[in-house]
Image: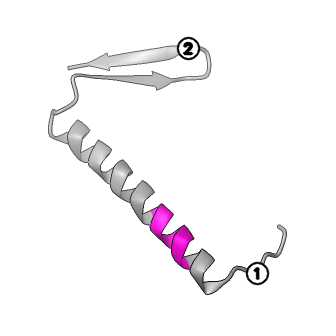
Amino acid sequence: MESTTLTYQQLLNENNQLRLQLEEATDTLDAIRTGQVDALIVNNGGGGISYTH
C-alpha cells in the first residue's frame, strides 16, 4: 500500500464524501426494507437477477 500524506482539508473532504456515500446507502436500504422499492436488479456477473415485490 502506498503511503500518502493528506492535508487536514483533504481528510475533511474525504470524510464528507464517505458520509454522503453512507447516507445514500442507508437511505437505499431503508427504502428496500420499508417496501418503497418495487423491484431490484442485482448483477450476478453473468447478467442480472430481478427481484420484484
Pair 1/2: label in front: 1
Q: How far is the residue under mark 1 from the one under mark 2?
A: 40 Å
Quadrant of the snapshot with the C terminus? top left
Q: Is residue 23 left or right of residue 2?
A: left
Residue 16 position (above or below residue 35): below
Disc 1 crowd rating (10 Å Cα; few below 14, some 14-19, many 20+) is few
| Range of magenta residues | 12-18
- Asked whether 48 or 19 is in front, the reply is 19
Q: Amino acid at mark 1?
A: Thr
Q: Residue at x 21, y 22 (%)?
A: 38
Q: Residue at x 32, y 19 (%)?
A: 51
Q: Give the image location of residue 23, x and y in percent.
A: 34, 57
Name the quadrant containing residue 2. bottom right
Question: Residue 47, which numbered label?
Answer: 2
Q: Main secondary structure of the magenta part?
A: helix
Say which element carries label 2: loop
Say which element carries label 1: loop
Q: Is residue 27 left or right of residue 20?
A: left
Question: Residue 29, which numbered label?
Answer: none
Residue at which label 1 appears: 5
Q: Amino acid at mark 2?
A: Gly
